[in-house]
Amino acid sequence: MEAKKNPRANVGRNSSLYFAVGLNVMLLITYLGLEHKTYHAESTKIDVLMLNEQIEEDIPITTIEIPLPPPPKQVVTEAIAVVEDVEEIEETVIESTEIGQDDVIEERVVGIEEVEVEEIEEDIEVPFAVIEFVPQFPGCTGDNAELKACFQRKMQEHLQKHFKYPEIASELNIQGRVFVFFLIDKNGKVSNIQSRGPDKILETEAERIISLLPTMEPGKQRNRPVGVPYSIPINFKLQKQ
């Protein structure tokens, strides 16, 4: 015997749809439950101050005593007495020192004896190449040509004797040629030393060597001592070992 069942009365035909709807509803409820926030209400006590009676404070009255100002000082006025001038004062007349057209100028002849001529010595410098008598180095003798050759020879000996390579320049490998300019003044002394070179260390050493030059007999031009400028190169060169 077959069971008779109405196909419309089948409850399980939409079970998957119901399951999906129920699942979504549960997820929604779970999400809302997790996201719901609650706050703890803090109880605040409010004190109400009731003033039934107003307290009145008695403020004392302060009296300030201001001293009276001092009386004004009495101003003593002196009587001005008018005294008549009895003595007569002579006025001094100041004459003008300007010369007018009517004034006569006294002619005065000035003699030669009354004129003093003051000689002013000028420092004359004559180059070493054209001077009549070159500065005489100690120990040099002869004519001007011999004195010039002896001067240059003594100068080279002086450089070799006092030459000292600066230690700092040697460590820094500084070398080059230094030109030294100086003046042999009319007293035979070396002055106005100047130098020009590749480094300040070498220039200082070259000036030191020239400053050790001895006092010479000054150069002469027309039998008169004059200053003689002179220049000499000093070569600083390191030797390779």
Image (spheres, grey):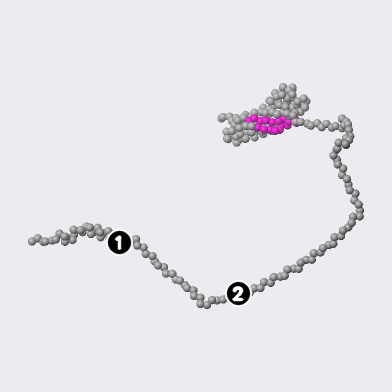
Res. 100 image quadrant: top right
Which is nearer the eye, 40 or 72?
A: 72
For the record, the magenta segment spans: 178-195
The label on residue 59 is 2
Q: Quadrant of the N terminus?
A: bottom left
Horizontal side of residue 29 vs 194, given as left or right: left
For numbered disc 2, what is the local secondary structure? loop
Residue 186 on the magenta span: yes
The reply to whether residue 43 is visible in this rendering is: yes
- Choose mark 2 or mark 1, whichever is in front: 2
Q: Does the rendering let one see residue 138?
A: no
Check disc 1 and report the residue beneath it. Answer: 29
Q: In the image, what residue type sits under mark 2?
A: Ile
CB under 8 Å between callouts 2 and 1? Answer: no
Residue 233 x %, y %:
64, 28
Residue 192 image offset from top left, x and y in percent? 70, 33
Three-letter amino acid code at the position of disc 1: Ile
